[in-house]
Image (tube, helix red, strand yellow):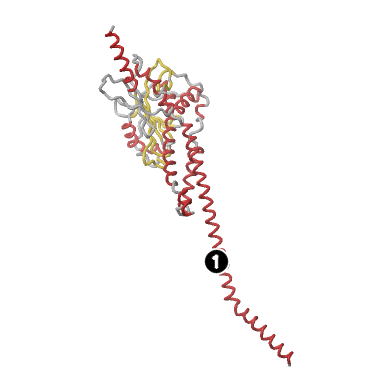
């Protein structure tokens, strides 16, 4: 009896350790990782539990049942790593690549590379025009190596390269008896619904690392991941912009001047317009569901599930709010520029009037003087004649 009670207590105290070992660690680049297996070593310190601020992290425990259970059909847990290195990629430039990976081809709005990496450790890569690429089955060091050996060797492919790349990291597992879905923070690649449109059906596909049946599902998840990292890059740039404008209210309050020159003010206005355009007006924006999914509700469900898990809509709204605040500062700057221009024009007009007066005096002064003096002499002569 006591032995059974003691054994129950041991299991009771060990259970939280097993649970904590699966909590994913969230880094400042919005990377999401999770442990691939449970450690049986009780001396190993558990991973720190992050704050639950996103649906993906709050629902991480939903993937525990998949992670803890091993089945004959279930493969190893692998990494999905996303890297954003520029504001935009010109995909057409990849034709100039001196050694483009074999069998690379266009897949809807991406450049798809079905196999890349060392033999036996190949992965799959999707490259998108928003400056991001998504690697399936490759780790971070492999993704950065891909950027160096493939992306960076294409002349002119990057538009506005980023100083620091933005990343997202998730995990996936292949299990042909499960339904393809996002469960917690784990992507499960399994059974899928065939495309309902012939436009999204592909034939004569090259050999690939992962199952052909889930290719379009991987594409949908990849496009959502690429949007998230591209949005992260925009968030960082906007925060830097707001930081650079943080002294404007203090400068106006103390000196009545913006504290920056006219050219610099105009550059700030252009920078803010660029943020607004990149967020809402570009073809690859963060608000609209791509047209590709309109005829494919199953693929749209995969895309939306990842978008919701990464808070893309909420983050987009937050960025728009920040831009709205910055737009108020923009209106102040525009008013300051207008007042400065008006004041300068007034000074120029006054100066021109003064010059015109001086020129008139120099040119017509003697004649006016003669007229005035001549009239006085003629008046005196008439007065003298009247007295005589």
Question: In terms of depth relative to the viewer, which is nearer, 141 or 352?
Answer: 352
Q: Residue at x 58, y 70 (%)?
A: 356
- In this rendering, the answer to whether 342 lies above or below 31 is below
Instruction: Give the left or right position of residue 151, taking residue 318 as reference.
Output: left
* Residue 282 placement (x, y as % from top left): 49, 38
Residue positioned most to the front: 2
Residue 124 showing in the rendered view:
no
Q: How many marks?
A: 1
How many residues crowd around disc 1 within 10 Å: few (fewer than 14), some, or many (20 or more)?
few
Query: Which quarter of the rendering shows the N terminus?
Result: top left
- Determine which quarter of the picture holds residue 207: top left
- In this rendering, the answer to whether 171 lies above or below 132 is above
> Which residue lies under the disc numbered 1?
351
Residue positioned most to the bottom: 388
- Determine which quarter of the picture holds residue 131: top left
* Residue 215 placement (x, y as % from top left): 42, 24
Helix, strand or loop at label 1? It is helix
- Determine which quarter of the picture holds residue 119: top left
- In this rendering, the answer to whether 254 lies above or below 243 is below
* Residue 330 placement (x, y as % from top left): 51, 47
Question: In terms of depth relative to the viewer, which is nearer, 231 or 89?
Answer: 231
Residue 187 showing in the rendered view:
yes
* Residue 213 placement (x, y as % from top left): 42, 20
């Amino acid at each position: 009896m006591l032995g059974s009670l003691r054994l129950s207590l041991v299991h009771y105290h060990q259970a939280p350790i097993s649970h904590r070992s699966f909590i994913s660690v969230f880094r400042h680049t919005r990377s999401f990782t999770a442990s691939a297996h449970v450690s049986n070593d009780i001396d190993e310190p558990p991973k720190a539990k992050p704050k639950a601020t996103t649906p993906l992290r709050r629902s991480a425990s939903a993937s525990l049942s998949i992670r803890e259970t091993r089945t004959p059909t279930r493969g190893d847990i692998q990494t999905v790593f996303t890297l954003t290195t520029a504001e935009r990629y010109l995909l057409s430039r990849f034709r100039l690549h001196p050694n483009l990976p074999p069998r690379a081809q266009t897949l809807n709005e991406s450049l798809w590379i079905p196999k890349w990496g060392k033999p036996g450790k190949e992965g799959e890569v999707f490259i998108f025009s928003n400056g991001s690429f998504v690697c399936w089955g490759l780790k971070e060091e492999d993704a950065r190596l891909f950027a160096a050996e493939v992306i960076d060797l294409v002349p002119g492919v990057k538009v506005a390269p980023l100083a620091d790349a933005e990343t997202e990291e998730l995990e996936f597992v292949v299990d042909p008896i499960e339904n393809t879905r996002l469960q917690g923070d784990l992507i499960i690649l399994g059974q899928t619904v065939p495309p309902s449109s012939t436009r999204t059906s592909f034939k004569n596909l090259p050999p690939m690392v992962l199952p052909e049946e889930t290719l379009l599902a991987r594409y949908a998840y990849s496009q959502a991941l690429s949007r998230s990292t591209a949005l992260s890059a925009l968030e960082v740039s906007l925060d830097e912009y707001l930081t650079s404008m943080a002294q404007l209210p203090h400068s106006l309050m103390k000196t009545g001047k913006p504290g920056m020159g006219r050219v610099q003010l105009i550059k700030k206005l252009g920078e803010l317009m660029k943020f607004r355009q990149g967020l809402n007006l570009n073809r690859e924006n963060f608000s609209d569901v791509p047209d590709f999914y309109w005829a494919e509700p199953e693929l749209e469900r995969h895309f939306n599930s990842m978008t919701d898990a990464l808070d893309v809509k909420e983050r987009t709204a937050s960025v728009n709010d920040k831009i709205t605040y910055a737009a108020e500062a923009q209106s102040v700057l525009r008013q300051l520029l207008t007042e400065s221009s008006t004041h300068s024009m007034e000074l120029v007009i006054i100066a021109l009037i003064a010059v015109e007066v001086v020129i008139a005096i120099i040119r017509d002064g003697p004649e006016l003087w003669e007229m005035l003096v001549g009239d006085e002499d003629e008046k005196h002569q008439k007065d003298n004649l009247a007295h005589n």
